[in-house]
Image: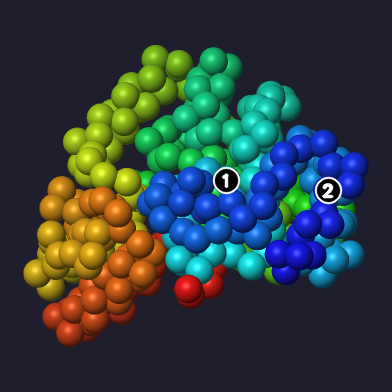
Amino acid sequence: MAEQAQHIGEGFRGELRYDEPMSRHTSLKVGGPADLYAVPEDVDDLQALVRQLAEQQIPWLVIGRGYNLLVRDGGIRSAVISLERFSRIEAVGDGRIRAEAGAENLAVVRFGQQLGLGGIGFISGIPGTIGGAIRMNAGAYGEGLLQRTACITLLRDGAVCEFCIDELDYGYRRLDLQPGDLVLAATLQLVPRDPAETEDEVRKDLELRRSKHNVGHPSAGSFFKNPAGQAAWRLIDAAGLRGASEGGALVSPVHSNFLVNSGNATAADFLGLSERVKAAVLEQSGVVLEEEVRIVGEEP
């Protein structure tokens, strides 16, 4: 694949990097190299890139800012496409705003606030971008972003398509799409809200996350999904794993559903620690934990 990737790029206006360490692009600061790392300028550039990749039979993976991503140490034998330059946010009327996939979550909340619109303050403190938040139905306090989403713009089979939310299958921390679908943007249905009230929501959310989630080391946020009716961190605590470590990976003493890079961790350290946590929780509580982080890439 690496040799094929060298032939990609004719007419491409964005940025291309070869053998790019994914540790530079994930919040966990681990991960081997991607054969090709591409940053398209706009939708036309993206479509041209995807077309070339298809012609060369090179698979591809889309990322935002890498906040919910664990890349194995062997890296990625495909193209990685970053949508970091897709960050436009605009009002589209009727209480709706449209945010491109690379727009930061807090920036989207602030944009709505300026228009006197709210209802998505719960994503204020979730690091990352709207594309990732839509893809995993990010949320907090019993709410998910897709509950406030009117429609989603996708790149499907090389064509730009729009789907209303009732045409899509989604649930807790998931959105089921077709293989190869790429989230380009989301149109969010907000509600009238006094900017001061939104400011209060944002402040409380950020303060709460700083107090509970300030783990002091690189992390991917919550590493495991909360099982129905239970909190993953409580199950991990009950299994006696708070503060447990594997190499440089550590179950945070501050929040036990955060697995953090305490220094020079590898992806293998995180994967080993994750398996250890899951086994201990299963033995102690009979509950099967499932990773919330997206795990991709090859073994060394």
Looking at the image, residue 31 sits to the left or right of residue 238; the answer is right
Q: Position of residue 65 (x, y in %)?
A: 52, 43
Residue beneath the point at 13% across and 61% down:
242
The reply to whether callout 1 and callout 2 are in contact (CB within 8 Å) is: no
Say whether residue 96 is visible: no
Which element type, helix, strand or loop, lies under badge 1? loop
Q: Quadrant of residue 230?
A: bottom left
Q: Secondary structure at mark 2?
A: loop
Kindly identify the amino acid type of the residue bearing the numbered disc 1: Gly
Q: Position of residue 160 (x, y in %)?
A: 83, 49
The residue under the point 31% across, 31% down is 206
Residue 150, given in percent of the width and then of the height, sits at 66, 44
Disc 2 residue crowd, few under 14, some 14–19, many 20+, Cα 10 Å? some
Q: Is residue 58 above or below residue 34?
A: below
Give x and y (percent) for residue 42.
Answer: 78, 36
Instruction: Say which residue label 1 marks.
Output: 64
Please identify the quarter of the rendering in which residue 207 is found. Answer: top left
What residue is rendered at 31% in x and 58% in y? 265
Of callouts 1 and 2, the N-terminal one = 2
Camera-side residue: 83 or 35? 35
Q: Residue at x 76, y 37 (%)?
A: 14
**Residue 23 relative to residue 125: left or right:** right
Q: Is residue 175 above or below residue 272?
A: above
Q: Is residue 184 above or below residue 267?
A: above
Residue 260 shows in the view: yes
Q: Answer above or below: position of 228 versus 158.
A: below
Residue at label 2? Answer: 9
Amino acid type at image mark 2: Gly
Quarter of the figure that contains the N terminus: bottom right
Question: Which numbered mark, 1 or 2, is in the foreground of this view?
Answer: 2
Q: Alpha-carbon distance for marks 1 and 2? A: 21 Å
Q: Residues within 10 Å of mark 1 (few under 14, many from 20)?
A: many
